[in-house]
Image (spheres, helix red, strand yellow):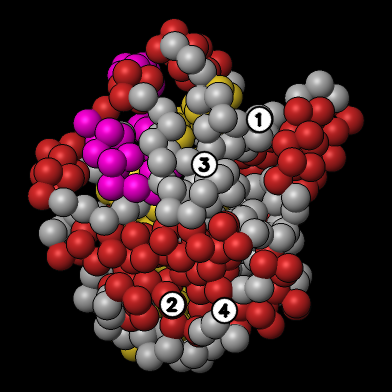
Amino acid sequence: MKYAFTHANLLDGSRDMEVRPSMTVLVENDKIVSLKEKGSVPEGFEEIDLQGRYLMPGLINAHVHLPGTGKPTNASEASDLAAKVDKSKLMQTVLSSVVKKNILTSLNAGITTIRSVGEVSYRDLANRDMINIGKYVGPRVLACGYGVTVHGGHTDGLMGIPCETPEECVKVIRDNAAKGADWIKIFVTGGVFDAAVKGEPGVVRMPYELAKASCDEAHKLGFKVASHTESTEGVRIALKAGVDTIEHGARMDEEIIRLYKENGSAVICTIIPALAIARLPGEMTKMTEVNQYNAEVVMENIIESAKQALANDIPVGLGTDASCPYITHYALWREVYYFAKFCGASNAFALHTVTLRNAEILGLSEITGSIEDGKCADLIVTEQNPLEDLTALKDVSLVMARGHFIREPKVKRIDYIDQELDKLL
Ligand SMILES: [Zn+2]
């Protein structure tokens, strides 16, 4: 378990990173132990000669759901299935293996850390534990368990447990804590799937009192809180309640900018799920015209929110919302690409965002997100320079996750999805 990466063109994950040529990076067990220009290979280290290929930190996907593959499903069928899983050991086993497959797809696409933000029947937590005890090699997984929602709220009956009182919210959070959750997820607003009319994808569903009770309990137990939030009013309520990460986000006003800063909260930008629904034909994504219209509204809000956040020094992270229609577990490169294209981030800053910035937001920057002495060996290699062209991230030629080497990463792609999304690049 000792490797020396030599002749690396190194991208270290820092904010203004530039290529550092001819670098030697030593890895021992799960850690990076040395970083030198033209360093020699010590005794006992296996040399991996990169011959000028690009070595950078493993990617971090700050917003995923692991039960789906990205192939569109009918929402009511999914809810029916989810209701059955909790009651059936057999279905839990099946779902566990689906989750594992999606986790491995992420890993083979160069994603070495995932935050799952809403799941079914604690299968993400079960897989996280399997990885952590060495049953299989996978990325680092942070998981939330079930989300806190309201009756008729976003993901009610799917990944969220509906609550009517603060006590019920507290119970969901304590149940998640007992199952070993890493974060808490709440759903303050509706979303594209459940909005009944045009123009209200971000209608506020969760009253402030429930959001506040959820944040208070989560914080008391030492958890951070992520909130699904897709409108300005929703963001205001979520931030006043004390949410740590706003998922998706919406246009900000002065008060909201102030609240983000006071709380030290971040926003997780997710352009591609909205883009796919808004811009692909509804027959493909199984979405209605109302869904498509609302996805366009959400997309504009997400982009505007990210731009305003960048302009105001509010941390922005990146996630894919994998499992949404047409959003696969290897699509993170697309989010990075659109973040640069639509939000005006440089390629270096976009790469920094999907590595070290995401690590900072998730509270992991001491252990991952950049290539530095003492950090975990979470690494990827690309043939081309992603600073010149972010699509270089599409194919990674090596992956290392906490020192575990994937020498020939292979992603099983869903061709019809890629073909349609490629038309939107
Ligand atoms: Zn989501």
Residue that lies at the very extreme toward the top in this rendered image: 167
In this rendering, the label closer to the viewer, 1 or 4: 1
In space, the residues marked 2 and 3 are separated at their CA atoms by 22 Å
The quarter of the displayed image where residue 415 is located: bottom right
In this rendering, the label closer to the viewer, 3 or 4: 3
Q: Residue 378 location in percent, x, y?
A: 48, 60
Query: Label 1: which residue?
Result: 157
Does the magenta run of residues contain 162?
Answer: no
Sequence-first disc among 1 and 2: 1
Query: Label 2: which residue?
Result: 337
Q: Residue 369 location in percent, x, y?
A: 37, 59
In space, the residues marked 3 and 1 are separated at their CA atoms by 15 Å
Query: Label 3: which residue?
Result: 117
The quarter of the displayed image where residue 212 is located: top left
Sequence-first disc among 4 and 2: 2
Badge 4 marks a residue whose secondary structure is: helix
Q: Residue 238 location in percent, x, y?
A: 30, 35
Sequence-first disc among 3 and 4: 3
Badge 3 marks a residue whose secondary structure is: loop
Query: Label 4: which residue?
Result: 394
